[in-house]
Amino acid sequence: MNKVAQIFIKESFLVPVVAILLGLIVGAIAMLAGGFNPLIAYESLFIKVFGNLYNFGETIRQITPLIFTGLAVAFAFRTGLFNIGAEGQFIMGMVSSVCVGAMLDLPFYIHVPLALIVGGVVGGLWGAIVGYLKSVRGVHEVITSIMLNWVALYFSNYILKTFLVPEGQQRSRDIHESASISIGWLSEMFDSARLHWGTLIALAAAVVFYIILWKTKTGFELRAVGFNPHASEYAGMNVNKNVVKAMFIGGLFAGLGGACEVLGVFHYQAIASALPGYGFDGIAVALIGGNTPLGVVLGAILFGALSFGAAGMKFGAGVPVELIRIVISSVIFFVAAHGIVRYLLKPVLAKKKEVL
């Protein structure tokens, strides 16, 4: 029992929990300032997420791509890189997997793995472009990754219009049933919520993230290069190669997320006029999760639940959807500015040391 209690009073547990609570409090203050009742708003949010099986299933569906993009951003952070390009990598994973899913007709045991692998690899190669430009040409990854997000958007639209969109339509033709990763029986249990195998793949990706970074020689080199590229080079590591490799793996996570979104949720891809936003939300998820795989999963759950539950706040309490962004932004702020949280927790942590 003492061991269980110690887990809940550890700094690594207390800081993010208190940061989330502070974010919710700041959000409540903003709602009060706007003349809304925060208790009713949070109750409506809770009911929207957990009120029925359909909404709960759709919340899980909303969380899944955030895990992928959160892992993509967190992996780069862990290796000393700032992957703003998860958005573009996600889009390239979508368009490449829909090409495989719609243009090829194969047995499902070949079609599904092939579409997922192609989506992941193409997303990884899109990320590797950023790594190559940084390592060989010295171009900062923030600049190139932001630019490549828009290149990915318009390039994917070009591919769709040229090869997959029927005349007069604004979306591609549907993928073949053999390429779908939807779970029909589970969707029926959740009142037709769009559940798919991508959720389990996302959790498996989090495990792979941990194994690569902390259980392999490659992961040690990637982290070492991120900590100090000059010392790593002196130790005989190929810094440029590891930068490209890190961005490829990060892009692979995002591309796999895009593939799962197409193969499991929509079964087609529409001509887009704006970025979907999952990559940018992944930055917030990575920050909330402290760039750890478990933290990313928990951060995606929080972010996805708040985002999906925002509609409940609007209809149940009359709160504008934009206010949920204040809550999310406040949580991100307090998690990122963990020094403030530690300062507020100083009396609790000091008391804990006295007891020990």
Image (spheres, rainbow, N blue to C red):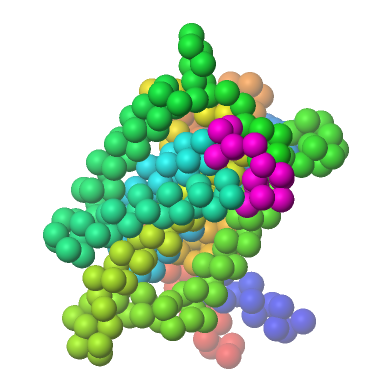
Of residue 172 and residue 34, the one placed in the foreground of this image is 172
**Residue 39 shows in the view:** no
**Residue 179 shows in the view:** yes
Of residue 347 and residue 218, the one placed in the foreground of this image is 218
**Figure quadrant of residue 305:** top right
**Figure quadrant of residue 3:** bottom right
Q: Quadrant of the N terminus?
A: bottom right
On the rendered structure, is 226 left or right of 351?
left
**Figure quadrant of residue 39:** top right
Q: Position of residue 198 (x, y in %)?
A: 64, 48
Q: Could you tell me which residue is drawn at 46 percent across and 54 percent down?
A: 121
Q: Quadrant of the C terminus?
A: bottom right
- In the rendered image, residue 101 lying in the magenta stretch gets the answer yes
On the rendered structure, is 115 left or right of 350?
right
- In the rendered image, residue 37 lying in the magenta stretch gets the answer no
Q: Could you tell me which residue is drawn at 49 percent across and 20 percent down?
A: 165
The magenta span reads: 100-113
Q: Position of residue 212 (x, y in %)?
A: 50, 73
Q: Could you tell me which residue is drawn at 29 percent across and 76 percent down?
A: 225
The majority secondary structure of the magenta stretch comes to helix
**Up-down relation of residue 339 to residue 147 (above or below):** below
Q: Could you tell me which residue is drawn at 40 percent across and 46 percent down?
A: 89
Q: Position of residue 175 (x, y in %)?
A: 62, 32
